[in-house]
Image: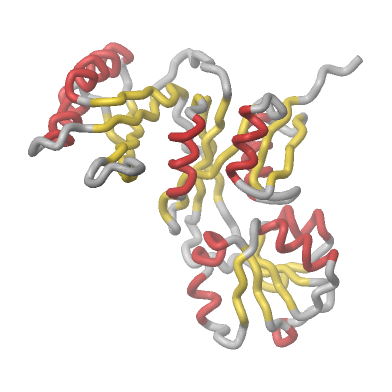
Amino acid sequence: MEPEKLKIAIQGVKGSFHEEAAYKYFGNDIETLECESFKRTCELLKQGKADFVVMAIENSIAGSILPNYNLLRDYRFHILGEVHLHIQQHLLALPGTKLEDIKFVESHPIAIRQCDEFLSEHPEWIVKEGMDTAACAQAIVSDKLTNTAAIAGEAAAKIYGLDIIERRIETNKKNATRFLILSNDVVEQKNANKASLSFQTGNAVGSLAIILQCFAEQNVNLSKIQSMPVVGKRNEYDFYVDVEWKKQSDYDAAIRKVLKHSVNFNIMGEYIKNERV
């Protein structure tokens, strides 16, 4: 009897960048669970119907995906690792469709933002936001949309039998997205050299600066900081930071210092840094 495959919840459908990120992290011998929203992926993990979630958290062009920080706060999953994916966006349409046939272009809002420059060259097109890049490609086939193109990746073109009528339409050719791997369980990572943390500070002048100095004094690099309002509390913020270190003792010492100056401190995950795209 073959062992049961890992079930990975992804936002979107087959051929999406989330599925590509899942294959890159876990290998091809997995089962991806298609979800219409990021919240749905979290629900599947919470209910034990998925083993892990792959969740986009930031893009080099579009920036941080802020609603997903809210999900990290609400569900409090453990961050097991990260994946960086080089994002190449293409214009896909039914075989035989020409550029002059297109009246509508559909894709995920972030993918649309990544292709602003190309789309501005075609002001006659009506641009519509969809749930997912690959789902928009899938809809063109299922609904036989001869006047519609989708912005999606090459995997979606192959899976749904669409032609790539314009390649590499992303504005920045170094376009990349960072994905987090989320688990219900704390999984200790040997040789971890990166962590995602969250905390709040007091309202005194310099409160945040004091915490950041704690990291600097211990040679711990702050690679990202993101603030989000605390729900229902005016002028109060959750800070989400990613830190990297070379010596575990430096990181441990920094955490001890930060604990003295922060509120609601949480280690969301300690894992191995991965920047391969």
- Image quadrant assignment for residue 109: bottom right
Above or below, 60 against 118 in this view is above
Considering the image in quadrants, where does the N terminus appear? top right
Name the residue nearer the viewer: 68 or 27: 68
Applied colour scheme: secondary structure
Query: Toward which corner of the image does residue 223 lie, by quadrant?
Result: top left
What is the total number of numbered labels drawn onto the structure image?
0
Left/right placement of residue 184 relative to residue 51 reads left
In this rendering, would 233 be left or right of 37?
left
Measuring 44% from the left and 58% from the top, which residue is drawn there?
61
The x, y position of residue 133, in whole percent, is 66, 58
In x, y percent, where is residue 89? 61, 61
Q: Nearer the viewer, residue 265 or 103?
A: 265
**Position in image of residue 234 (x %, y %):** 25, 46
Q: Is residue 14 left or right of residue 143?
A: left
Along the viewing direction, whichever of 182 and 249 lies nearer the viewer: 182
Q: Is residue 200 above or below residue 93?
A: above
Q: Residue at x 68, y 43 (%)?
A: 19
Residue drawn at 32 percent across, 41 percent down? 230
**Residue at 83% across, 66% down:** 141
Front in this rendered view, residue 264 or 145? 264
Q: Give the residue furthest to the front.
A: 232
Most distant residue in the left direction:
205
- Spot occupied by residue 272 in the image (x, y as percentages of width and height): 46, 24
Q: Is residue 239 above or below residue 258?
A: below
- Furthest toward the right, the residue is 1
